[in-house]
Image (cartoon, helix red, strand yellow):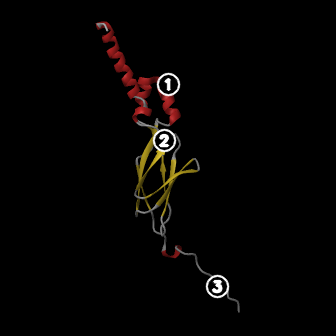
Amino acid sequence: MTFVSRRVLGPCSLVLALMAAGCSSIIEGTSQTLSFDSNPSGAECTLNRNGMAIGSVRTPGGLTVKKTKHDINLVCHKDGYQDATAFLKSDVAGATAGNIILGGGIGWAIDSASGADNKYNEHTTVTLVPLAAGAAAPAKTSSVQP
């Protein structure tokens, strides 16, 4: 290899490496592990996206989900408590801007199609409110006739 070709290949390979490093698919992946907690702990939580259950977890716990542009609704249940809900918004992943700047439209299109350009809040905590003492059981009625 000549001195000139080494001088040209060195910077070119650096540029290619930087373009690949800006890719959300490589840096952040297409799935994400989320952690959930509740006060009190021990709640059974279901994750729903677009009206379909995508997983469940008992708090405290974690779950790996596929990243998409769609938000996730979390519903947690524990006996003796009102159900608690949380909204996990699908936000833009940090590596997306670098991908657009360095990789252009092709890299962004690939990441967008795979969901890699999105992310969710990594930790969610919900607080469950105790049921009122009278609301725990329905009122009984008497059907005795004279």
Task: Indicate which disc residue 106 carries.
Answer: 1
Task: State the SS at label 1.
Answer: helix
Observer-side mark, 3 or 1, equals: 1
| Label 2 sits on residue | 67
Structural distance between the alpha carbons of marks 3 and 2: 54 Å
**Can you say which quadrant of the picture contains the N terminus?**
top left
Structural distance between the alpha carbons of marks 3 and 1: 71 Å
Is 1 or 72 nearer to us in this picture? 1
Identify which residue is drawn at 34% across, 20% down.
14
Please, what is the three-letter code of the amino acid marked with disc 2? Lys
| Label 3 sits on residue | 142
Q: Earlier in the sequence, mark 3 or mark 2?
A: 2
x, y percent for residue 19? 40, 24
Identify which residue is drawn at 43% across, 37% down.
29
x, y percent for residue 84? 48, 60
Q: Counting other residues with Cα less than 10 Å from the Cα at mark 1, is it few (<14), some (14-19), or many (20 or more)? A: few
